[in-house]
Amino acid sequence: MPANRDVCALTKSSVLDKWAADASGIRAIEQGDNVITMFDVIGEDYWSGGGITAKRVAAQLRAIGDRPVEVQINSPGGDMFEGIAIYNVLREHPQDITVKVMGMAASAASIIAMAGDRIEIGAASFLMIHNCWVIAIGNRHDMAETADWLAPFDQAMVDLYAAKTGRDAKDVAKWMDAETYMSGSQAIERGFADALLSADTMKVDEDAKSRDQDVNELRALELSLVSAGSSRTDARARINKIKGTPGAASEATPGAGDEWTGLTGLLSTLKS
């Protein structure tokens, strides 16, 4: 570990914004009892109480049993280390896994997508790969040490993508350096997916999209405070303190699921 331990692998706020604008409400029209849906950030999420974790995926796989599995993904990514764990959990499943990228598989979610024996993607969907992105606090020596510490994780992703796609590792590394978004046809051309999804298999859930956009505002604000030097705990405490401001959100426990009453008021207060 770097000398400074305040290092977290996160999804960049710009990626959250793109997901919220382009893909957050996209869902499958039909779902079977052998389907695992990943329509959230990767890793446990403080603000919604949701998030996709390896523990939850493992439990779903046990419930499905020794049958083929379909994994539907629409996620901006999140915790890269949790993404790698989920990838490995899926790869251990004894039956075939079909991955369907419904809206976006970005960052850590793109790692999970590579677990599919067959990968299908919507024509207007995106798959994004980039280098591991962290928030780290410290001086230049800490930053240099952090950079060295991150190098093996980037290489692990290069190796994973190259093995799945059959593309040269140098090409994959360049795409990661450039933070590359690939449309459905580009993902197929480059070997990251096998086929396009039919457009009539998807719908847009406007309620889900609205909720995701609201939560992303809070996630982005948290990232901004952490980037400015606050710990994640302090950042969350400061945001929650604003809930007591007149016109802000009513008292609610973070992660209370559908308790969105007052959240719009909180966001309006934060923006003003």
Image: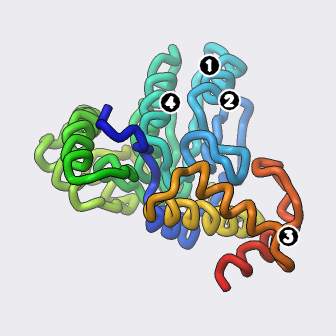
Label 3 vs 2, first from the N-terminus = 2
Q: On screen, 110 above or below 202?
A: above
Hey, what amino acid is under mark 1? Arg
261 left or right of 35 in image: right
Q: On screen, 35 above or below 60?
A: below
Q: Which residue matches tag 4?
A: 86
2 left or right of 53 in image: left
* Comparing labels 3 and 1, the label whose residue is closer to the camera: 3
Q: Are marks 4 and 2 in contact (CB under 8 Å)?
A: no
Q: Are marks 2 and 1 in contact (CB under 8 Å)?
A: yes
Q: Which residue matches tag 3?
A: 262
- Image-quadrant location for residue 186: bottom left
Separation of disc 3 and disc 2 at Cα?
A: 36 Å
- Image-quadrant location for residue 71: top right
Expressed as whole percent of the image width and height from the top left, the position of residue 175 reads: 22, 55
66 left or right of 95 in image: right
At x 32% / y 51%, what residue is drawn? 138
Judge whether residue 150 can be spotted in this image: yes
Expressed as whole percent of the image width and height from the top left, the position of residue 119 reads: 43, 41
* Comparing labels 4 and 1, the label whose residue is closer to the camera: 4
Label 2 vs 1, first from the N-terminus = 2
At x 75% / y 63%, what residue is drawn? 241
User: Circle 2: is it few (<14), some (14-19), or many (20+) Cα within 10 Å?
Assistant: some
Q: Which residue matches tag 1?
A: 67
Hey, what amino acid is under mark 3? Gly
Q: Quadrant of the N terminus?
A: top left
* Comparing labels 3 and 2, the label whose residue is closer to the camera: 3
Hey, what amino acid is under mark 4? Ile
Separation of disc 4 and disc 3 at Cα?
A: 34 Å
Q: Secondary structure at mark 1?
A: loop
Separation of disc 4 and disc 1 at Cα?
A: 18 Å
At x 71% / y 74%, what residue is drawn? 267
